[in-house]
Amino acid sequence: MLQFVFILLVIINALLFLFLSKKISYLFVYYMSSCVYYSSAFWGYYHSNISGFSSGVFDDTMIDAKTYWLMIVNMLCIMFVLIVGAIRKKIGSCQNDCNSNNDNSGGDGGGVNYRNSGFVSERYAVRVAIAFSFIVAIFCVLPPVISSFGGSFNKAELLEDAPGIVNYFKCIVTFLTIYLFTQKRVNYSKMDYIAVLFLMFLTLLLGHRSYVVIAIIGILITRINTSSKGKNLLALFVKNWKKILLIVLCFFVFMFSKNIYTALFNGNIDLVKNRLSDSSYYQNSIKVSEFNTIFANLDSVVSRDYTFPIDIYLKRTLFTALPVVNKYIEEEPFSRKYQMDLFGVNTRASTFIGEAYACGGFLLSVIIILLVIIIVLLLAFGARNAKSNIWRTFFILSSVDVAFYIHRNSLEYGLYRVRSYLLIAIFVYAIYLFLERMKKNEK
């Protein structure tokens, strides 16, 4: 019965989005992410024995009723916000939204309003950021990546040995990628694009597919919404079916590449060929995908009544926004503790809904789900109204990251990533302001 209710709510939300929205909103991205990461709820079970990948033999675990209730609550929260937004537009209280093409999306860049003199400063500010990224790549990224070729590639060990600046390298490269492919009115050379794409390729070599996915989603959504002149989201999808298909293809490519990535790095070409030519490989990849693991994380926390101190949860979540203070928090985070307690490993990512449930049950889960949705809407508002390409990029990047990837992260880590993007935006914008000030002094 609960499975049927969940599926019904998914269908109702889909219809509401298709016929009430005119563009791809970041709320829709959150909805699609929910459908993907919690896809096990459609079947009623998940695979708990992911070690059986080679043999194709998996243990099916039925989903706990309380987990279904959380999935239903998540869909109801999406429906509530979507309907409230539709009513708000209907009664004419969204004058600002109407001026920005009537939607809660990344916008089309119409808000960017630089003086002509600012174009040069912005271009050089971005090129300084690109140069900085190359310096980090040469000294901190390329050496461990090159040493891993043909050897024993291990993503966790590679990142553990890497200096802290590498974490910001991934973020700034994603920022620059989205910036270049969505910015308006500033001219860049082909070498600028080639340089940033090369840096993104290095990020992929580090084993971080998520940043590439975020960049692709952010770029394509912005470009699709820019061309939106249809009466609803369905018409927009029909008009841009090639771009939608590209997103879907990228989704499957990244999903099926996970279990050949290490073999390819280690030079085990025979294993790569055998897996890609075996139809069962694709079936097993779906069965033990990241989405299956994330749902298993959530259901394990709920079904085993796992608990975590709410004071530590709030402390770590609130202080994660402070770059220095958060390093002095001694208490172990939920993400690490629950994995070691329930699975004995630390490689399964996290679950922000499971985290909230462990700290405060259903009530806190509802509050946190609504809080995350509100954060997504606020970031989307910023993307739509930003007067600067640099700040608009920050809002687009943060909106996509939170909306799509929050389901595999803790709330603490989700906010940490937004904080990283914010520091990068401040860094680039500060260079821009510095160059503008120098130009004024010369005059």
Image: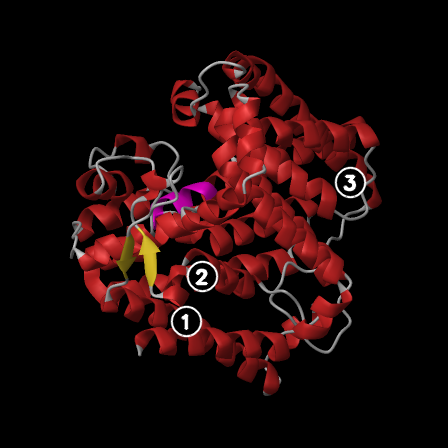
**Image x and y of residue 438, in percent:** 73, 28
Left or right: 244 as drawn, with respect to 5: right
Question: Mark 2, residues whose alpha carbon is within 10 Å: few (<14), some, or many (≥20)?
Answer: many
**Quadrant position of residue 233:** bottom right
Which residue bears the numbered disc 1?
Answer: 75
Question: Mark 3, residues whose alpha carbon is within 10 Å: few (<14), some, or many (≥20)?
Answer: some
> What residue appears at the point 66 percent right and 43 percent down from the top-left corner?
178
Left or right: 201 as drawn, with respect to 70: right
> What residue appears at the point 24 percent right and 69 percent down from the top-left corner?
65
Earlier-in-chain disc, 3 versus 2 = 2
**Image x and y of residue 341, in percent:** 17, 41
Asked whether 397 or 217 is in front, the reply is 217
Identify residue type, mark 3.
Answer: Gly
Q: Secondary structure at mark 1?
A: helix
Which residue bears the numbered disc 2?
Answer: 34
Which stretch did the figure color magenta?
Answer: 410-417
Identify residue type, mark 1.
Answer: Met
Q: Nearer the viewer, mark 3 or mark 2?
A: 2
Res. 381 mark: none
Asked whether 47 or 224 is in front, the reply is 47
Q: Secondary structure at mark 3?
A: helix
Q: Secondary structure at mark 2?
A: helix
Which residue bears the numbered disc 3?
Answer: 118
Earlier-in-chain disc, 3 versus 1 = 1
Left or right: 397 as drawn, with respect to 259: right
The chief SS type of the magenta part is: helix
Earlier-in-chain disc, 1 versus 2 = 2
